[in-house]
Each structure stands twice: as C-alpha cells, then as structure tokens.
Amino acid sequence: MPFLSLSPAQFRNLDDKTIDLLSREVYFTGENGQGKSNLLEALYYSAYGSSFRTHADQEIVKKGCDSMSLRTIYREENGNTHSTFISIEKGKKKIEKDGKIIHDRKELVNTMPCVLYSHDDLDFATGSPERRRFFIDQSLSMYDVMYIDVMRRYKRILKSRNICLKERNYNLLDSYDIQLVMNGLEIQKKRKTAVFQFNQIFGKLYEDIEGTAGVSIRYEPSWKKTGEDNSGDSSLPMIDDVMETIKSKREMEKTLCTTMSGPHRDRIIFVKDGNSFVPTASTGQRRLIVLVLRTAQAVYYTRVTGKKPVLLMDDVLLELDPEKRRRLTSMLPEYDQLFCTFLPGEPYENYMHEGTMVYSIKNGGWEKIR
C-alpha cells in the first residue's frame, strides 16, 4: 500500500510534527484558515519543489521563522520507494531525492506525480490564453523531461529576440528566428498531440456528468499551414513556411518591439458544436469544465505513463449541486492516493469508502476522527 509520511516543519501555519498518511483516501475537514490547504500545498511542494499558491519560496515559511523543511516518503505500487527532502534556510532552498542533492526541479518529475484540483483552476476556462497554454504545458511536463528542456530553450530564445527588438539590434534576428522556429514547432507538435489525446477523454466525461454533448477542446496554433483556418486539423507547417511567416511580421515587430507569432501566442479554446462555449456557459458549467479538465489530466497521465497519480482536491466541490458532486466523485480516475479538503457541514460521508482516514484540522494541528 502506498504511503506518504509528511514532516511539515515550520511550513506556513502548520505545527512542527509528522503525519503518517497510510490510507488510500485521506480527508481533511475544518474551518477556513486552519491549515487544510497548507497540507495539500506541502504534498505538492514535495512532489514538484514549488508551490501552487505562490512563486516566492520564502512566503511558505511559517510567519516568524526563517527556515522550514519537508520530508516525504513515497512508495509506488510496484514496491519502489522514493524519498524527498526539501528545506529553506535563510532564503536558500535545498532539494534532495533519495538522499542525493539535485539542482534542477525537473529531476523530481515522475517521483510523486500529483494532480491538483483547486479554485484557481477556473482561470483555465475564464482566464487569459496564457493560463490554458500553461495547463497543457503542465500536463506534458508531468512526465516528459524533454518537453521541459525545449520549453526552457524556447523561452530563452524568445526573451533574447525580444531584447534585440527593443534595443533595435536587428543583426541577430535571423539567427534567433531559426532557433525559435525549430524549438517552437517541436512545442506545437507535442501540444497538438496532447490536445488530441485529451479530447478522447474530456468530452465523454463532461457529457456523463453534466449531460451536455459536443463539448471539446480546440487547439489553434499561432503558426499554421498556408490556407488552414482555425478549425483545420491538418499537419503543422514546414520550417520554410514558418520562416516566411516570421519575416512577413518583422516590420510590425520592429514597431511593437515584441515577437508576434509562435507557441507563446497559441490559443486553446473550449467549444461546443464548433462554437466557443465558455462565454455562454453558466458558472456551474465553467466550474465543471475545469474539474473535468483536471480529471482528464489524471487519465491522460496514466495512459501515457502507466502510473496512477496522487489526487489533491482542495474544496472544489462547493459550487456543484449534489447530483453533479455524486457523479464527479463516482467518475474520478484511478489514483494511487486521494487527499481532499472539506469545510464543516460538507457531507463527505457520501464520498468516502471503507478505510478512508478523516482528520480534523484546527490551528495548524490535526486530530484523527475516523
């Protein structure tokens, strides 16, 4: 049986002690501000070396302290065991995996794969195009180290190219253009494949829970084959075609001092029967879109890797009616472990199974109540 042993020393407002999470399902219940989400954040931080709530590491250290540490032990279904130790001391972060110091967070990929359901996910439906690109990139980065590398290269090249445009140093543009295209087309290829695979999962799940058919995800790459419209599903353009596209925009880019095309301008849209769905969707439908999207992410990860993820669900059922809550929880994908947070009064008894552990969280401490 997989397990996690968490030692959240000085982590936000959590007490400095160890909690052993031996059950396949663990529920945390308590009022807002007591530390429920901090426990999920600690698990996520152990898995990826970063927080889902802040980009500033120092913000996760408990107020009044200058250090923190997290030690996690994770055992896979095949019996392989991994340990991680992450500490922050006087602003300096150290990450260890299986007793060895690592210097790049990408080395944590596939160690303890977590899929997080949170309120901020609503941005994937209603937020900027950047947020939807982030979701697809995150889905790929959960298992594909090569994708992490190509994304990093692309961002470095894009940044350098934009600096050239702002400083009117145009001599290097031709060199940056070919690098931008080579890496950018690789990103678009992987995104296109990922969206196609997501659509094998997403629409059916959404229909089963909400009852609305014909909802899908459409990928609109910034670089297209000549004559292709947004609904086309043909192959990506050739390198020479993209180079021509970039050259045709160069004068405009010199004026605006920024790169006008590439994967950083791709669009990902939720559609119903070919038309944009989110603008006319209800609040409940929008919330359900992102819940199904996260569920599809977990299914996608398992199909690609053969591994079951750890699911982290942070008070995400609140805006669904009881019947949709029941349907969603009954259709959760296969998982290694499930961690959920609930407010008092939530009928979590309707979702739990035999062996589910329930903890009451108060003032950063916890008490097992089942």
Image (cartoon, rainbow, N blue to C red):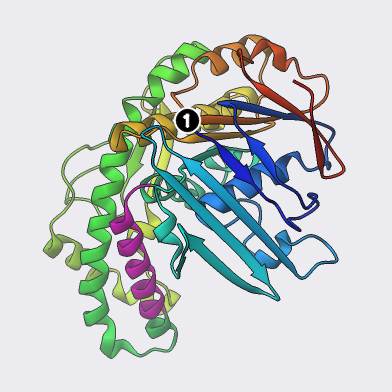
Q: Give above or below for 86 relative to 16.
A: below
Residue 170: x %, y % from top left: 31, 87
Residue 75: x %, y % from top left: 46, 39
Q: Is residue 271 magenta?
A: no
Left or right of 346 on screen, residue 124? left
Q: Main secondary structure of the magenta part?
A: helix
Q: What element does badge 1 sit on?
A: loop
Quadrant showing the C terminus: top right
> Quarter of the image holding residue 260?
bottom left
Amino acid type, callout 1: Asp
Residue appearing at x 46%, y 12% in the figure: 208
Query: Label 1: few (<14), some or many (≥20) within 10 Å?
Result: many
> Quarter of the image holding residue 26?
top right
Tag 1 residue: 336
Boundaries of the magenta span: 143-162
Residue 282: x %, y % from top left: 62, 24
Q: Give above or below for 308 relative to 347.
A: below
Left or right of 366 on screen, residue 310? left
Left or right of 328 on screen, residue 300? left
Between 186 and 81, the one nearer to me in the picture: 81
Between 164 and 309, the one nearer to me in the picture: 309
